[in-house]
Image: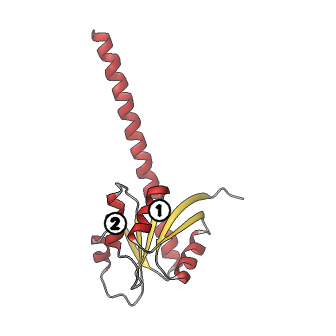
Amino acid sequence: MAEQNVIDVIIVTEQLEQIDFVEKILKQQYVVNMHQANQVTDLKRILDFESIQLIIVDDAESTLGVGSVRLSVKDLRLQTPILQLVSADNNQPFGQFMKNGASIVCPKDDATAIASNAGLLLSYGDNQSKATQDSDAIDDYRHKFDVLARRRVC
């Protein structure tokens, strides 16, 4: 059996059938630790204690908006990508969701789009994390070389 990546995901919705649908899609490629949040306080608590790699926001009427989710992520100084799911009858332009903070917008009933966009955002997040680690390592080495150079001069 091929090794699967373990991912931590928050889904922002109250619709249990949407949670099951998304979880089923993601479990085809990943081992998923799914968290659900319906309130800003729940979202911040989960983000604070878990290493979340992806946030999925449903466009249901009673769900937190993507803008509130993005503000919560920024408040905690995180860069977690957000996948916005929209229904076919939603007449709001995708660009508006992206202005409000969504990383990618896709139809909520299209399993292929959800799987591919989630994979894209997970790869992006992983690469961002590696770039940050590399930058920190470079800064550490730069500091060590500066210390050595000062010792030689003295």
Q: Judging from the image, what secondary structure is the residue with disc 1 in?
A: helix
Quarter-of-image position of residue 99: bottom left
Q: Quadrant of the N terminus?
A: bottom right
Q: Which residue is located at x 57 percent, y 73 percent?
A: 23
At label 2, the amino acid type is Arg
At label 1, the amino acid type is Ile
Q: Please tell me the numbered disc located at residue 110.
A: none
Furthest-top residue in this view: 154
How many numbered circles are shown?
2
Of residues 121 and 42, which is closer to you in this image?
42
- Single out the mark in the foreground, 1 or 2: 1
Q: Which residue is located at x 61 percent, y 68 percent?
A: 27
Horizontal side of residue 107 vs 67, given as left or right: right
Place of residue 41 in the rendered image (x, y in percent of width and height, measured from the top left): 40, 67
Horizontal side of residue 148 vs 37, given as left or right: left
Q: Quadrant of the C terminus?
A: top left
Residue of label 2:
70
Q: Which residue is located at x 36 percent, y 87 percent?
A: 90
Place of residue 49 in the rendered image (x, y in percent of width and height, measured from the top left): 48, 56
Place of residue 38 in the rendered image (x, y in percent of width and height, measured from the top left): 44, 75
Colour scheme in the image?
secondary structure
Crowd rating for badge 1 (residues with CA inside 10 Å; few <14, some 14–19, many 20+):
some
Q: Which residue is located at x 58 percent, y 78 percent?
A: 20
Crowd rating for badge 2 (residues with CA inside 10 Å; few <14, some 14–19, many 20+):
many
Residue at mark 1 to residue at mark 2: CA–CA distance: 14 Å
Horizontal side of residue 96 vs 134, given as left or right: left
Of residues 17 and 37, which is closer to you in this image?
37
Tell me, yes or no, whether the two marked residues, 1 and 2, touch with CB atoms within 8 Å: no
Q: Please tell me the numbered disc located at residue 46.
A: 1
Furthest-right residue in this view: 1
Instruction: Check the image and report above or below for 104 versus 109.
Output: above
